[in-house]
Image: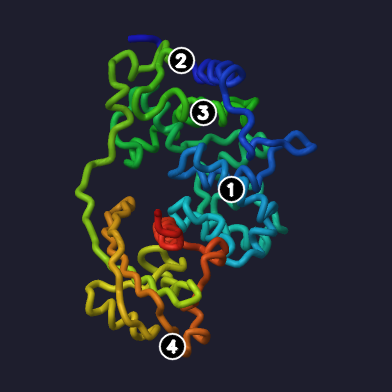
Amino acid sequence: MTPRAMPQTVAARLLHWFDRHGRKDLPWQRTAANGRRDAYRVWLSEVMLQQTQVGTVVGYFERFVDALPALRDLAMADEDTVLALWSGLGYYRRARFLHRAAQLCVERHDGELPREFSALAALPGIGRSTAGAILAQAHGLRFAILDGNVKRVLSRYHGIHGHPGQSAVEKELWRHAEAHTPATRIADYTQAIMDLGATVCTRSSPRCDACPLAGDCIARRDGLTAQLPGRKPARTIPTRATMLLVLRDGRGRVLLERRGPQGLWPGLWSLPEALDPDAAWRIARQHAQIDDVQAIAPFAHTFSHFRLHVEPLLFDGATAHGGIADNPRLRWCSAGELAALGLPAPIRSLLLDIARPPAT
């Protein structure tokens, strides 16, 4: 069996690789006058990078910090502003946790992210790995991280079988993550192991010839890179169906409805919904005087746990009934106002498509 490298040797090789190939110009890596990264920016990037790749995150990150450049700005923002800035990134609970955590920091921590691990990890949406990443990258403190990229690197390097989401597997991965984290250059090491997973030790077609750990990687030695880390047990994804009602008045405004706190897209602005054509007509007539309906091309949207089949119905030239102005969950919205609202990405795309003039 190939001898295993000592933990500090692994860190040294990763840092040497990082100095030559690591990513050093990401917008959240910019340092302040004290030479440290801004904890707010590190936190925001870590939350955005959960379930989302760097290439997608950069644009969202820059727009977010342009609008809300500091933690106190985020805390004071209304939820619609936060969700509008987040719209398109998905997993909107992340944005709500981010917003609530910022408010708690103002209430309990003088408007700053706490530097104590337990207090930081206790904030909404900040668990062990995210807290470690913030403290390591913003303050140079020795805390390990274990995001998806790191799990993949360590699973392959140490030959750890099983899905990383399983408790016993995750416990073993944390043990290795702690052991490999060096005493110095913590921020660079943290970025190095994440970069290695994102750019070299990728899920499919890993570039083992470019990996600084390839010499004693068990997965490479045993031909297991396609099997490690273990896959999540497969399950059938159910399909749901719904109808979305696009009520558009003579001024081009569309009726939006804020969804409830539970279920699909909680708290976001969306379109009225129905399960069948009869219900669609009944709901549409509750909100406006309508004469006709036009079917729009159906589409599907896949979530982590189900697939949604959507049939949009366009009720053009609708005339609003009275009373909607007094209902905080309903509003007529022009195309220009959509950008300021938290809308699910497929709903925003649908409304933008409808607003475009037909091709000639």
Q: x, y (%) of residue 342?
A: 51, 63
Which residue is nearer to you in this view: 213 or 240? 240
Q: Are marks 3 and 2 in contact (CB under 8 Å)?
A: no
The label shown at residue 116 is none
First in sequence, mark 4 or 3: give its number: 3
Residue at the spot of label 1: 44
Q: Given the image, on which type of amino acid does mark 1 rest?
A: Leu
Q: CA distance from mark 2 to mark 1?
A: 30 Å
Residue identifier under label 3: 195
- Label 2 sits on what residue type? Ala
Residue lying furthest left: 236
Residue 49 drawn at (x, y percent): 50, 42
> Which is closer to the viewer, label 2 or label 4?
4
Q: Can you identify the residue that label 2 sits on?
A: 210
Question: In terms of sequence position, does the residue under pointer 2 or pointer 4 come before the other?
Answer: 2
Q: Position of residue 173 (x, y in %)?
A: 41, 32
Residue 190: image location, x then y, percent = 56, 31
Instruction: Give the Cα separation between the discs numbered 2 and 4.
Output: 65 Å
